[in-house]
Image: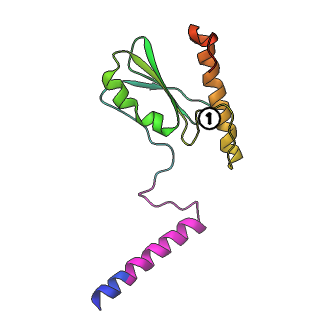
Amino acid sequence: MRYAALTAATVSAAAITAAVAKDHPGIRFASLEEGQPEYTSTLYTQDCYPNDFGAADCKLDYGEISVILFGDSHAQSTAAAVQLENRNAALGWALAGCPSLRNFAMDDKKQEKKCHGFIKEKTGYIEKSIPWSTSHSI
């Protein structure tokens, strides 16, 4: 009987918390932080630049760039592993939830517009900056 009462109290507290969070989005509990997490590493330095897309746009480490990590959050999550083997700098370009494709559609049109803008900007940079890219289709 004691465990049934404890279970009922726990479920009730969770339901009340969920209802408050859903119905009152302005109320945030102390354990919740808004915004994108800041990615840091002791393996390499990271200089990130603001952009209009809310994307990770970072140079990892110093020196000549030899790698570009371009994609969604999965691409960003590989940075530490890549930099363990990469003796030079890398560019980390990532926008969570965005496929690395030029032509695609999403249900969330606002996110789709951000994704297309980010991809167009970065592929344009590659086409202008990397000599081999003009002879190959990206």
The stretch in magenta equals 8-32
Please state the horizontal and vertical placement of residue 71, each as a whole percent of the image. 53, 33
* Viewer-proximal residue among 34 and 98: 98
Residue shown at 68% from the left, 48% from the top:
108
Please state the horizontal and vertical placement of residue 11, each as a whole percent of the image. 42, 78
Q: How is the rendered protein coloured?
A: rainbow
Please state the horizontal and vertical placement of residue 16, each as a whole percent of the image. 49, 75
SS assignment at label 1? loop
- Residue 8 in sight from this viewpoint: yes
- Residue 44 in sight from this viewpoint: no
Left or right of residue 93: residue 102:
right
User: Which residue is denoted by mark 1 in the rendering?
Assistant: 53
Left or right of residue 128: residue 10:
left
- The amino acid at mark 1 is Phe
Q: Is residue 71 magenta?
A: no
Q: Quadrant of the C terminus?
A: top right
Q: Is residue 20 magenta?
A: yes
* Viewer-proximal residue among 93 and 21: 93
What secondary structure is the magenta-colored segment mainly? helix
Please state the horizontal and vertical placement of residue 61, each as a whole percent of the image. 38, 20
Residue shown at 66% from the left, 26% from the top:
120
Residue shown at 37% from the left, 15% from the top:
88
Dot 1 surroundings within 10 Å: few (below 14), some, or many (20 or more)?
A: some
